[in-house]
Amino acid sequence: MSQTELTRATPEQIEAERRRWMFRHPLVIRVTHWVNALALAILLMSGLQIFNAHPALYWGPVSTFDHPLLSMTASEDDPPRGVTNILGRSYDTTGYLGVSPSGTGELADRGFPSWITLPADQDLTGGRRWHFFFAWVLVLNGLAYLAYGLVSGQLRFRLIPTRHQLRHFGASVREHLTLRFPQGDEAKRYNVIQKLTYLLVIAVLLPLQVLAGLAMSPAMNAVAPFLLDLFGGRQSARTVHFVIAGLLVLFVVVHVALVLLSGFWNNMRGMLTGWFVIARKVRPLRATTRTGEPT
């Protein structure tokens, strides 16, 4: 805006935004982020394929078939109905859980529908191959992220909230609930909710998920029998594994929603190229007359 235009503008017109570029995500962070996203997606879909081999969850060392915590079954009606039982309560989930369309369009008896499992057809062996391979991808990718983060200092910068941030935790919660996202210098770093959430996922949920998966392996039980004691039995470990998978899905859904709401293209550019745009508001200038006197 030229000086002549400034003299004719109102304070509301003069207030503007100054764009600044910052390099936010190093290459290793970007690569491990996308590898992690791919691995988690395939692990979820192949895990649901494995779950479909016996779509029920129990607590304890053995399967208590008469008292599942969760089950997905088909009724004996004609046509069959999908029935999902959660903690003793039954729900009709025909078309989604228990009974859903097969590849030919006919209703089939299966826990989760074919469009969300890998492979799509009932294939326990194929599901296990996909699952075990990408479990190793997830673990190795996570170790690479942690090693780089520790050596470079990025881990502390990205995951550990400062005392100032912790003191303003309530304000950050209110900002998220009202969809008011940080601007200016505050947008340079993750806020306290982001840091605590990522810390919970990286330091608690993912390691616990891997341990629960290992506890279900008979080979690992022979090498590390304490894993079964840690979870209270193989069926308990399977239930923990399933619940954490659901929490990770919830995290991803919220994460993607916030990416969309806070600026999809800016966030995607940051995670693809590393460069992120910071919008800094300029303080309003007082409009002046043609003679230069304040209005």
Image (tube, rainbow, N blue to C red):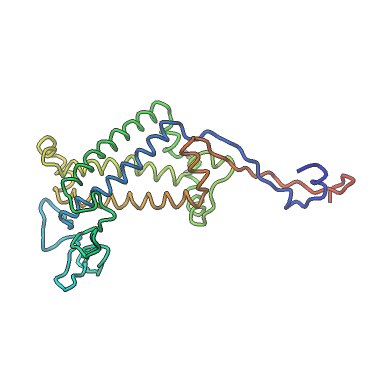
Residue drawn at (44%, 52%), measured in percent from left and top?
257
Label count reads 0
Horizontal side of residue 130 vs 251, given as left or right: left
Residue lying furthest right in this view? 291
Left or right: 263 as drawn, with respect to 222: right
Toward the bottom, the furthest residue is: 78
Direction from residue 173 to residue 101 in the image, left or right? left
Position in image of residue 238 (x %, y %) = 19, 50
Residue at 31% in and 32% down: 143
Residue farthest along the front direction in this orientation: 104
Q: Quadrant of the N terminus?
A: top right
Pinpoint residue 242: horizontal percent, then vertical percent: 24, 51
Depth order, front residue of 166/123: 123
Query: Residue 109 occupies which quadrant of the picture?
Result: bottom left
- For image coordinates 16% across by 60% down, the residue present is 68
Vertical side of 66 occupied by 265: above or below: above
Residue found 38% across the figure and 49% down from its top: 252
Return the x and y of residue 289 as percentages of the image width and height.
Answer: 86, 49
Residue 221: percent from left, percent from top: 12, 39
Rendered position, 28 above or below 245: above
